[in-house]
Image (tube, helix red, strand yellow):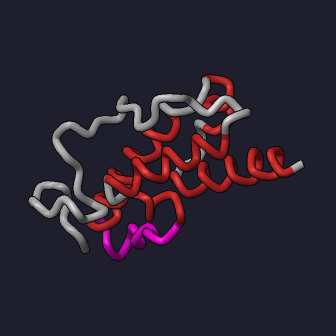
Amino acid sequence: MANDGNESDSNSSYSLHHSDHPGMVLVSKSLDGNNYSTWRRATTISLNAKSKFGFVDGTLKAPFAKTKPEDYTTWKKCNDMVLSWILNSLTLDITYSLIFYDTAHKVWKDLQNHFFSKQRT
């Protein structure tokens, strides 16, 4: 698997910079329900810049924890970081409705299903 964040490959989806932390805010304007398109675009740009978009679009799947426990641990650490960044970019009422999802991909899909269809009607 890719490095665990301790190696210098900053292009790896599993690399975390020393300044990355769960309380970090990736976008300046929180998703409030009325700004989904601009929030999604800004978040996509930020996650792509950090090589983390695969966690939200589902292309970086979790390794099987029983057969690859170290790989799963690395994946889980990065997924949880991305999940916290997304939750930090939402208003509190939206965050509370999503806090129990376990993957960034599930949160991303839920937001898309809820707000994308709302903006199209």
What x and y, as percent, mark residue 97?
Answer: 68, 34
The residue closer to the viewer here, 77 or 12, is 12
Q: Is residue 8 left or right of residue 86?
A: left
Residue found 53% across the figure and 64% down from its top: 57
Q: Is residue 14 left or right of residue 60?
A: left
Quarter of image, res 68: bottom left
Considering the whole magenta stretch, tell me its main secondary structure: loop
Q: Residue furthest top?
A: 92
Number of callouts: 0
Q: Residue furthest right?
A: 121
Residue found 18% across the figure and 59% down from its top: 10
What x and y, as percent, mark residue 48?
Answer: 39, 57
Instruction: Look at the image and tell me in which quarter the N terminus lies.
Output: bottom left
Q: Which residues are magenta?
A: 58-69
The residue closer to the viewer here, 95 or 72, is 95
The residue closer to the viewer here, 116 or 62, is 116
Quarter of image, res 105: bottom right
Quarter of image, res 27: top left
What x and y, as percent, mark residue 47?
Answer: 41, 52
**Is residue 85 one of those drawn in magenta?**
no
Residue found 67% across the figure and 29% down from its top: 32
The residue closer to the viewer here, 65 or 109, is 109
Residue found 38% across the figure and 71% down from its top: 66
Check the image and report above or below for 54 versus 31: below
**Is residue 60 one of those drawn in magenta?**
yes
What x and y, as percent, mark residue 12?
Answer: 25, 65
